């Protein structure tokens, strides 16, 4: 193990945020009982906000962003984690206040790590990433609220995005009829190849709507928020459930209580960052089993560390289809 490694650093000065790939040394990493040699990371929406500074994600500078990583344990002071084992990290403030995945090495707390399921490579795990793991948390929340495939279609908003693409593939594999809402209807063939049965233009959901509308879907996975989530709730069938995890349209929720008090709709909030370990283990074990890996390949593209700043701009502009994997050693 050499002492020097490559990392994407984000700095902030009076002119704004700056990012560049630099050589760093092990003693510049933060505290942790496990040292991981990173193989792959990924660019999530949140990483886009962190790298560009368009959202206050980074809490101290300089920072190595990257909320996800997968790699091999090189040193461990944690009795539950052995040297040579392969691990995944999602969230826990990594890439925000603790140096993250856009580097060849990361020093982390062992309790944050989950074992890489045996059937997945580090590349596949990062093609899933926080976006895919969150999609699984959404599916689990719908199931927890009694949603089953026989009740009718499930709507997925932001369907061409990371959470959306994986949610479409997962739900279709589990036997659900999936309606995919997107602003990129020209990508309908892609969404159908993932398992979507119907495509909806997101314009139908993104403007202010009525408190209640025609009942159109039994449940929904929403990564968009704002008017979209309000309209999704207003058009969910009696007794249905909506898993809300994102804010791609906005942080606001201009809705009424009508869907809750007149149709008994459940709104389930999803947080991946601090989700308990037991839930993470179930989510990853299920992702390894229930996600069609050929579909995963179709939704992902591999880039290098140098490409991350441009990818960060693209994901915020809604131009990334599916998932971007970062090969930190490329
Ligand atoms: P992506 O950028 O990959 O996907 C977001 C998608 O939302 C876009 O591809 C686009 O889909 C749609 N979209 C973008 N802008 C708008 C808009 N103005 N109005 C309506 N739809 C829009 O991001 P991710 O999938 O990585 O993340 C999605 C959201 O989920 C983000 O807000 C992210 O912060 C959040 N998230 C939350 C987590 C949690 O723990 N709660 C974990 C992971 C993500 P299309 O082109 O198909 O319309």
Image (tube, rainbow, N blue to C red):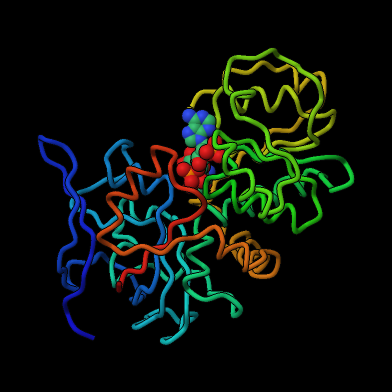
Tell me the quarter of the picture where residue 262 sits.
top right
Residue 139 shows in this picture? yes
Q: Quadrant of the N terminus?
A: bottom left
Q: Is residue 217 above or below residue 258?
A: below
Q: Quadrant of the C terminus?
A: bottom left
Q: Is residue 129 above or below residue 310?
A: below
Q: Position of residue 141 (x, y in %)?
A: 70, 47
Q: Position of residue 49 (x, y in %)?
A: 34, 41
Residue depicted at x 60% and y 26% = 228
Residue depicted at x 28% and y 47% = 51
Q: Is residue 302 above or below residue 51?
A: below
Tell me the quarter of the picture where residue 89 sits.
bottom left
Q: Nearer the viewer, residue 304 or 138?
A: 304
Residue 246 shows in this picture? no
Report how many numbered discs are placed on residues in the image: 0
- On screen, residue 36 versus residue 291, left or right, reads left
Residue depicted at x 57% and y 23% = 206
């Amino acid at each position: 193990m050499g002492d020097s490694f490559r990392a994407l650093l984000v700095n902030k000065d009076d002119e704004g945020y700056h990012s560049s790939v630099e050589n760093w040394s092990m003693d510049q990493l933060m505290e942790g009982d496990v040292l991981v040699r990173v193989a792959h990371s990924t660019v999530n929406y949140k990483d886009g906000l962190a790298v560009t500074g368009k959202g206050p994600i980074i809490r101290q500078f300089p920072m190595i962003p990257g909320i996800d990583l997968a790699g091999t344990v090189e040193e461990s002071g944690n009795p539950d984690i052995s040297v040579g084992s392969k691990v995944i990290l999602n969230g826990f403030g990594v890439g925000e206040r603790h140096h993250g995945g856009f580097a060849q090495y990361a020093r982390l707390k062992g309790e944050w790590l989950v074992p890489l399921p045996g059937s997945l490579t580090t590349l596949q795990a990062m093609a899933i990433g926080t976006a895919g793991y969150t999609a699984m948390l959404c599916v689990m929340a719908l199931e927890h609220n009694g949603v089953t495939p026989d009740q009718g279609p499930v709507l997925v908003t932001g369907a061409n995005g990371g959470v959306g693409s994986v949610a479409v593939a997962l739900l279709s594999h589990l036997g659900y009829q999936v309606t995919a809402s997107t602003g990129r209807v020209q990508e309908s063939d892609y969404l159908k190849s993932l398992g979507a049965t119907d495509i909806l233009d997101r314009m139908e959901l993104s403007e202010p709507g009525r408190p209640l509308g025609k009942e159109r879907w039994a449940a929904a996975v929403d990564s968009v928020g704002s008017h979209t989530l309000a309209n999704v709730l207003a058009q969910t069938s009696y007794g249905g459930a909506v898993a809300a995890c994102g804010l791609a349209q906005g942080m606001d929720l201009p809705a009424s209580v009508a869907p809750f008090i007149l149709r008994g709709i459940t709104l389930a909030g999803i947080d991946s960052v601090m989700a308990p370990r037991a839930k993470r283990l179930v989510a990853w074990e299920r992702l390894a089993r229930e996600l069609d890996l050929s579909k995963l390949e179709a939704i992902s593209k591999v880039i290098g560390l140098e490409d991350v700043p441009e990818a960060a701009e693209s994901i915020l502009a809604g131009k990334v289809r599916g998932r971007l994997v970062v090969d930190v050693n490329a």
